[in-house]
Amino acid sequence: MENVLPLFVVIPLAAGFVLPVVGLLKPGRFCAPICLGAVGALVVLSCMMFAGEPVVVTWMGGWVGQADPSSVTGIAMVCDGLTRLILLIISVVSLAAVLFSTSYMRSYTKVCLYYGPMMLMIAGMNGVVLSGDLFNIYVFLEVAAIASYALVGFGVESEELEASFKYLVLSAIASGFILLGVAIVYNLTGTLNLAQIGALIEGSEPNKALLLAIGLFLAGFGLKAAMVPFHAWLPDAHPSAPAPVSAMLSGILIKASGVYVLARIVFNVVGVHQSAVPAVLIMMGTLSLVVGALLMTAQWDFKRLLAYSSISHMGYVILALGVGAEQMAAGQHAAASLIMFAGLFHLANHAVFKSLLFLCSGSVVHRTGLRDMRAVAGIARRMPVTGFCTRVGSLSIGGVPPFNGFFSKLLIVIGLCWAGHPFLAVVAVLISFVTLYTFIKVQRYVLEGDVPQEFSAVTESPLPMLVAMAFLSVLCLGMGLLLPLHRFVLLEPAKDALFNGLGYARSVFGG
């Protein structure tokens, strides 16, 4: 399986460079099929990886990794349980977004220039997830980020360009933090390999330079993940982008570029015993959870409401990982295992139901041209499939059983209580009710009521858009009801990869 790992980057990267050329030769005719074929291949490869060894390592450049950490050379690509989960999420959401794009993007000009950056963003995210090298994580972060700037501003209207520029500036600041942290770690350890860094740090006393690097990583990747107080770019970027791009940004980019790398560094590289890292994660998660939800309630712009909701729900994930790190440091492994499992489950669930809701909002905008929920009342009567999928996404994100969001939120609350944080458990429950209230408002204004006269002739969206939404709707139900079946295949190995802590280094060298 080690020979398969580079294909996760090579396939979308090659497609990203080929698609603009194909678009110029045969404008718009073959771009969508090529993009769909590439993403479909990634889905197949992602599923294949679950049949391989627990940890698969490829050393790039012809160098050979040795058992002695001090003698390891080369650039490592590493695939463990957590990597497999994130790769599958990226592939599945990308497939739905690209399928949706085949009809949705026809209202834009120069569509041949859209699919190239989309594939480059996928290549960048896959590279981030697979890279076992700190500097290459930074490089792939920039590949994904630059492609996403272009996609946010693809409509080239004033709103899109302003949001893209704001996103670019703040993301560049985050990249600066990350690069400075990489330089400090390299100066301290003399290596950029994550496993090697973890092996060298293990058992060493924390020093001010390392603590500074950790702080820079928390700020940089926290900004990439849009954690409060680093969230200012997200409420503009996500609503302004085309709907499938919004689904990609909220569904997978903030996770692959922010949450995943942050979790990997905290648990597998620097260790949970370093300084006040768990407390900082808990604080960031709680702030994001509360602030994102409160700002969400005041929104009438459908897509902006969803953007603020992303901040809140990533707060659930960061809070769970922070409490898990705290419990691991205290030796409470049972409580740590449950809360970390719940956090990763919610991360996967959020990728599905938030992508679904952004596609549903895109379907409404595609037919009405409006994002104001008060102006499109009763649209479900004219667009029944879109209305049904919007209800599924709303019930999932609101935590209503038997949908997937209910189970992950319930497990997070139970884990918080078990870990001795009843106050945070109450906060999580209250914010869940706030989210449910907000999405009842979505259903009340978007789906119910009398259809405005100007929309009396509106018809349902094209079939590819409906198939993409229906696919994610089925996942929203299946991921909850079938948890006992996919738990040991998808979630437990991902949790174990983080729970392994600094043993990640031994896993990589042993691989």
Image (cartoon, rainbow, N blue to C red):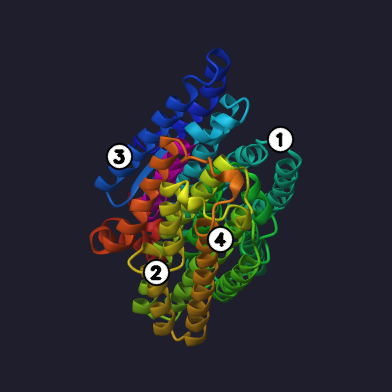
First in sequence: mark 4 or mark 1? 1
Residue picked out by circle 1: 156
| Front-most of residues 403 and 232 | 403
Q: Which mark is residue 445?
A: 4
Q: Residue at x 54, y 46 (%)?
A: 364
Q: Are marks 2 and 1 in contact (CB under 8 Å)?
A: no
First in sequence: mark 1 or mark 3? 3
**Real-space CA distance between mark 3 and mark 2, rounded to the nearest whole angstrom:** 39 Å
Q: Residue at x 71, y 35 (%)?
A: 156
Task: Please state if 178 lies on the left or on the right of 82 as rendered.
Answer: right
The residue type indicated by label 1 comes to Val
Q: Are marks 2 and 4 in contact (CB under 8 Å)?
A: no
**Real-space CA distance between mark 2 and mark 1, rounded to the nearest whole angstrom:** 39 Å
Q: Residue at x 63, y 47 (%)?
A: 370
The residue type indicated by label 3 comes to Met
The residue type indicated by label 2 comes to Val
Q: Secondary structure at mark 1?
A: loop
Q: Are marks 4 and 3 in contact (CB under 8 Å)?
A: no
Q: Which residues are magenta?
A: 74-100
Image coords of residue 265 (percent x, y): 52, 60
Label 2 neighbourhood size at 10 Å, few (<14), some (14-19), many (20+)?
A: some
Disc 2 vs disc 1: which is toward the camera?
Answer: 2
Residue 322 visible in the snapshot: no
Disc 1 vs disc 3: which is toward the camera?
Answer: 1
Residue picked out by circle 3: 1
Q: Residue at x 65, y 52 (%)?
A: 183
**Real-space CA distance between mark 2 and mark 4, rounded to the nearest whole angstrom:** 19 Å
Task: Please state if 36 lies on the left or on the right of 240 as rendered.
Answer: left
Residue picked out by circle 2: 400
Q: Is residue 343 magenta?
A: no
First in sequence: mark 2 or mark 1? 1
